Each structure stands twice: as structure tokens, then as C-alpha cells.
Image (cartoon, rainbow, N blue to C red):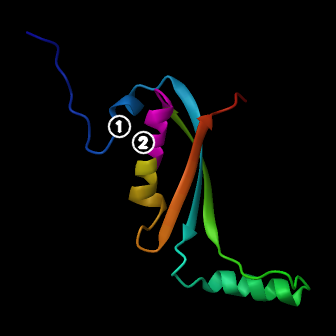
Amino acid sequence: MGPSTVAAPPDVPVSSRSPSATWIARVRITLKPVVNDPAGLSIGQALHHLGFDGVASVRTGKYFEIELAAADKAAAEQAVDLMCRQLLANPVVERYAFTVGRARRR
């Protein structure tokens, strides 16, 4: 008899299940340019009332720092991309960008 194997859950990068390094992902999510941004408009108006007349426009978004374990940078990037597509960003109205680097020791 050969060794038994367990199938990986769908959409889970295989290499991320056997981590050997800690990575930090910095994720920025913004509204697509064609989507109205009422919060951005309100902030822009408030800035003008405060005397910041040079502000042309404001767009709001979200920022995440995610510390994760993965075998290598490619596996960490694959995991973060999956996180963005499945939970963090709404692809209908938002776009995302991220960077992944080694986490600093605390």
C-alpha cells in the first residue's frame, strides 16, 4: 500500500498549507473610476470648507495589512489574490492592488 493523501480544498494554494516563511501583504482597494463616491465628495467638500482650495477631488478606499505564512513569495501572492477576489474586494465596483514582502521580526 502507498501513502495516503488528502485532497486539498478547492481554491486553496497547495504551497500555502506548508508554510516556511511569514509575509506581509499590503492591499489597497479603490472604487472603479466610473463608480460614484459619495464619501469622497463629502470629504472633498469638507476640505474646501477648511480652506484646502487646491483639492481637486477625493476618492475613498480601503487598506489592509495582512500577515500570512506561505512557502514562498509566489504562494503568498496567490493566497492574497484569492483573498481579494473572494472577500476583500467587490469586483463589480472595486479594483485592488497589493504588494507582498517578508514580514519583519517583532
Q: Nearer the viewer, residue 56 or 37?
A: 56
Q: Is residue 3 magenta?
A: no
Which comes sooner in the sequence, label 2 or label 1? Answer: 1
Question: Residue 62's x, y, as percent?
Answer: 61, 64
Q: Are marks 2 and 1 in contact (CB under 8 Å)?
A: yes
Residue located beneath label 2 in the image: 78
Q: Residue 58 vs residue 66: left or right? A: right
Judge the density around disc 1: few (<14), some (14-19), many (≥20) Cα neighbours within 10 Å. Answer: some
Residue located beneath label 1 in the image: 13
Three-letter amino acid code of the residue under disc 2: Gln
Find the magenta span and give its range. 70-80
- Secondary structure beneath dot 2 equals helix
Question: Residue 38's x, y, as percent?
Answer: 62, 86
Q: CA distance from mark 2 to mark 1?
A: 7 Å
Q: Quadrant of residue 22?
A: top right
Question: Residue 47's x, y, as percent?
Answer: 83, 83
Check the image and report above or below for 14 versus 54. above
Q: Quadrant of residue 61?
A: bottom right
Residue under the point 21% across and 32% down = 7
Three-letter amino acid code of the residue under disc 1: Pro
Check the image and name the residue furthest to the right. 51
Q: Quadrant of residue 6?
A: top left
What kind of secondary structure does the magenta stretch mostly adopt?
Answer: helix
Check the image and report above or below for 17 versus 61. above
Residue under the point 40% across and 50% down = 82
Question: In which quadrant is the N terminus drawn?
Answer: top left
Q: Residue 77 vs residue 25: left or right? A: left
In the image, which is nearer the foreground, mark 2 or mark 1?
A: 2
